[in-house]
Image: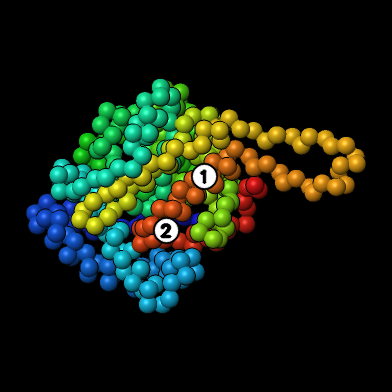
Amino acid sequence: MARWKGQTRGGTAGYLFFIYMIRYLGIGAAYGFLSLVVLYFIPFAPKATAATWRYARQTLGRNRWKSACLLLRNYYRLGQILIDKVAIGNGMVSKYHFEFEQYPRFLEVLNSGQGVIMIGAHVGNWEIGAPFFDDYGKKINIVMYDAEHQRIKELLEKSDRPYKVIPVNEDNLTHVFRITEALRQKEYVCFQGDRYLNQEKLLTCTFMGRVAAFPAGPFLLASRLKVPVVFYFAMREKGRTYRFHFAVADEAVRSRSPKPEQPQPKNEQAQTQPRQTQLKPEQVLLEQYVAALEGIVNRYPEQWFNYYPFWQLPQTTVSN
């Protein structure tokens, strides 16, 4: 089944090695050594390699040669992004360049005096934008699964992080109350909308030409609490440049509710085709998110970092 295990790849020793290399030899040296790490991961991370190969062959429709090239670029880009995260976390922001798309509209939403939900994905370097939120960062709550390796999180979070973390545990609902309270306090809650742990709370949608499952939680909360929703992606480009993409969801989604079918006269019923059931607000919001995410993946196909059978549907899904 296409289920993420709630853990991120990597070991403590590997992170420590790159942290010290960046500090004492520089970012360029870390990038250089990364080439050897990429060659190591291809055979020694078989599940991740197989998932990326299927993504290249089946989803992107690449031939074998282009799929092999994308596999190499994918691992290398992931390594670069991890190095950049450590470097920026250690005060090397000046060594990078940053570009923004739809930034004024994004700030307008943040300044609207409401709680805001931001939904990203495991593409690019989502957390890299945290230093640029300035005072907004004090109101940011990032929802993340608590199964990640605690020691690695400590290593990456030694610098003063400008945001708070809401941990998600599969067996309780404490995080739901914390999310609701943060929004009530007019703060910002950030989700990753492309991974799930609970197979009984899913929504499905066509993504990159194939049906995939997504966590229902972020989209249900956003549609029911009627708060502004922003889709946010931070993508790496050439020359140590990151481009931030912001897209504000359709405001009608958060107040829209399915309308009951209007009764028709009997003489018209026979002449009219059956109407399609109107999509629920959370499904409409999901489709907007998927459209934004699909545009990003098509533009940056090598920065897709879901290393499991993403398009393999579990047996239990939420009906549309």
Residue 4: image tag: none
Asked whether residue 109 appears in the rendered view, the answer is yes
Q: Amino acid at mark 1?
A: Gln
For this rendering, which residue is in front, 251 or 126?
Answer: 251
Q: Where is residue 133? Give x, y as percent.
A: 28, 34
Observer able to see residue 145: no
Image position, residue 311 (x, y; %):
53, 60
Residue at 36% from the left image edge and 62% from the top image edge: 302
> Horizontal and vertical percent for residue 88?
20, 45
Could you say where residue 288 lies in the image, as x and y percent from the top left?
A: 51, 44
At x 49%, y 65%, the residue is 59
Lateral position of residue 42 relative to residue 121, left or right: left
Between 228 and 188, the one nearer to me in the picture = 228
Distance (Cα) linking label 1 and label 2 = 16 Å
Name the kind of residue labelled 2 in the image: Asn
In the image, taking residue 266 as reference, residue 141 lies left or right, namely left
Q: Note whether 220 is above or below 95 in the view shown.
A: above
Asked which secondary structure carries label 1, the reply is helix
Q: Secondary structure at mark 2?
A: helix
* N-terminal label among 1 and 2: 1
Q: What's the residue at 42%, 58% (across, down)?
A: 298
Q: Identify the mark at residue 288; answer none if there is no mark.
A: 1
Q: Is residue 67 above or below residue 103?
A: below
Q: Residues within 10 Å of mark 1 (few under 14, many from 20)?
A: some
Q: Residue furthest right?
A: 267
**Among the 4 quarters of the image, the one containing residue 255:** top right
Crowd band around label 2 with a 10 angstrom C-alpha radius: few (<14), some (14–19), many (20+): few
Q: Which residue is mark 2?
A: 298
Give the quadrant of the N terminus. bottom right
